[in-house]
Image (spheres, rainbow, N blue to C red):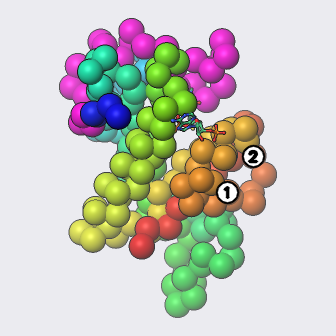
């Protein structure tokens, strides 16, 4: 069992040395984000980019931000009955998630998602937050279903679907 260190990145150079492609393509733009956008997002407070390190060095990253989700993207059962005029709910957005190609299928992606849910859970006691949400491709939904995320029934946009997990 490997030991991991998970903490916000301040130096983004190392991120550019990793491979976040998916079978030679980048359908969700994760590799491009790591190569081109991460530094600007991190330095301008658009996201916090967290790095995951093992004894092999940096092996993965994810980005998280405050956000909101329109209630119409959620199933009717999620609507708060006595807040009918609220058109969106506060959420934590898991914006990007990538594990280096060499390190996949060892549970590292799942561990990062659980870490985000734990962080959002902790924050929701201090800043109102109802869900963790993300967009993914239809062929990736299993990873999130296994961690109790629900898929929005809204039709995909740009081949991406919304998924959400309610915080306790
Ligand atoms: C998606 C991604 C982050 C998953 O990372 P990962 O570390 O491989 O994730 P996990 O190991 O937790 O899970 C991946 C699969 O391995 C399986 N798995 C988990 N632990 C395992 C283990 N010890 N041994 C074998 N398989 C394992 C999981 O069940 C899962 O199977 P599934 O795809 O059928 O659901 C990674 O593939 C990636 O970076 N892809 C490119 C970028 C991308 O698509 N990002 C997602 C944006 S939403």
Q: Residue furthest bottom?
A: 82
**In the image, 80: left or right of 40?**
right
Q: Secondary structure at mark 1?
A: strand
Q: Which mark is residue 118?
A: none
**Picture residue at 54% right of the left edge, 48% below the top:** 134
Q: Residue furthest front?
A: 1
Circle nearer the viewer, 1 or 2: 1
Q: Is residue 111 visible?
A: yes
- Residue 5, by quadrant, is top left
Q: Is residue 97 visible?
A: no
Q: Which residue is mark 2?
A: 156
**In the image, 80: left or right of 138?**
left
Task: Report the Cα–Cα distance between label 1 and label 2.
Answer: 10 Å
Q: Position of residue 107 (x, y in %)?
A: 48, 38
For the C terminus, the image quarter is bottom left
- The disc, 1 or 2, on the residue closer to the chain's N-terminal end is 1
Q: Position of residue 124 (x, y in %)?
A: 32, 67
Up the image or down, 75 lies above or below 38; here it is: below
Q: Which residue is mark 1?
A: 151
């Amino acid at each position: 069992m490997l030991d991991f260190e998970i903490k916000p990145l301040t130096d983004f150079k190392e991120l550019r040395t990793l491979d976040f492609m998916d079978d030679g393509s980048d359908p969700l733009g994760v590799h491009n984000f790591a190569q081109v956008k991460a530094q600007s997002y991190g330095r301008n407070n658009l996201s916090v980019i967290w790095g995951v390190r093992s004894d092999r060095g940096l092996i993965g990253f994810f980005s998280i931000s405050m956000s909101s989700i329109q209630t119409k993207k959620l199933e009717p059962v999620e609507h708060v009955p006595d807040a009918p005029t609220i058109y969106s709910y506060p959420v934590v957005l898991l914006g990007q998630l990538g594990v280096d190609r060499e390190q996949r299928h060892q549970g590292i992606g799942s561990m990062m998602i659980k870490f985000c849910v734990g962080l959002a859970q902790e924050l929701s006691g201090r800043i109102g937050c109802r869900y963790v949400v993300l967009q993914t491709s239809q062929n990736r939904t299993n990873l999130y279903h296994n961690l109790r995320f629900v898929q929005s029934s809204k039709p995909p946009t740009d081949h991406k679907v919304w998924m959400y997990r309610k915080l306790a």
